[in-house]
Amino acid sequence: MIEHRTPQTTVDVGQGKPIPVLVPESEQFARRLIKVARLRRKWAAREGVTCYRVYDADLPDYAAAIDLFEGAPETPGRWLVIAEYAAPKTIDPELAHARMTDILSIAPRVLGVAPDHVHARERLRARGGSQYALAGAPDARHGGTGGPAPAARRGAAHPADGAAAVHPLIREGGLTFEVNFDDYLDTGIFLDHRVTRGLVREHARGRRWFLNLFAYTGTATCYAADAGVEETVTVDLSNTYLDWAERNMVRNGFDGPEHHMVRADVMSWIRQMRRNPSNRWDLIFCDPPTFSNSSRMNRASFDVQRDHVELVSGVAALLTPEGEAIFSCNLRSFKPDVAELSRRGIELVDITEKTIPEDFARNRRIHHCYLVRQARNRR
């Protein structure tokens, strides 16, 4: 066990102010981060991307993901979210802690972010291979139907009673979204779905009705509305996320009565909607959690691997004859039962590869993504 570590050396990352580090090997991390940050910065400028993943455990010993967020003009600034992956049991926890401490010292200097704009997270390997769980609480992806998880960083400031919280705004795809670095494990937008949201916009053009299931903060609904759909329905079990989704919609100018927010258990809601043939949508986006056992659901638990056939079948039943759905999940080991879905008249097309952004290319299993259609109605 390594105890009471003191700085062993310093790392020069420029600006004439060497950084004391606890682990000499952290100099290698600094060199790697400087290199990938330069490449990511050029890529982001070329693509018009302002929020992106800079580093994703490029060095196995420095197992963390580093995301950079640039504020919109209304809330200028730069923020880092640094998520530490759980170290193998063979690694001395004190050594892992020292490495993370060095990451937290080096990253803001290299990336030009003020130390008080750095937010640390700890991600553990969750049920079924997801890496989106916080010790002691589910997050939006791991247990999204159960509502938001507490913040990983303690001591976050909260507004006084009756005061409105002022959260940073970011821009993506010509739209503005609210993010929150203090109160929840996830920030309010999944950066790995940047391309997927663009696909939602692309597939929404020329369509009338859009449905967003397990909607989280409604970013996909904003993209569909921006494409010109006539009516949207956004469904989630969490009032917190629905309020957040509504703020995102209003902020982007989509505040009319044709945009509906529905608090419901998605699985039960789908069964209810199927009973009325008039409840059909041209385009559906569905990004369920890996697992949830929220007491507010009308079932003991939801497991995306176990329950995906029922879910996808229900989604397909809500499509218009020429409609389609985009179905995604972040369970790394997810394997759809293509044979059973085909037997039910459902066509599933794997589009995962085209939905992985450049800044997530090191981890191509970050999510799975499929187009869903009613096969019996396709020519």
Image: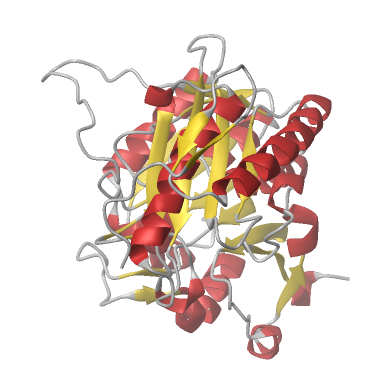
Above or below: residue 71 compared with residue 297: above
> Percent from the top left, x then y, of residue 317?
58, 69
Left or right placement of residue 301 versus residue 350 in this view: left
Say whether residue 209 is visible: no
**Residue projecting furthest to the right:** 379
Task: Decide which of 73, 82 is in the foreground and name it.
Answer: 82
On the image, the x and y values in percent for residue 366 come to 62, 61
259 and 151: which is toward the camera: 151
Among the 4 quarters of the image, the one containing residue 355: bottom right
Q: Residue furthest top?
A: 74
Residue at left offset 22%, top offset 39%: 154
Whether residue 58 is visible: yes
Q: In which quarter of the image is the C terminus?
A: bottom right
In front: 241, or 3? 3
Q: Which residue is drawn at 29% across and 37% down?
A: 183
Left or right of 340 on screen, residue 9? left
Q: Residue at x 66, y 55 (%)?
A: 58
Provide residue 18's location: percent of width, then percent of height: 54, 26
In the displayed structure, 279 sits above or below 156; it is: below
- Residue placed most toward the observer, 184 or 200: 184
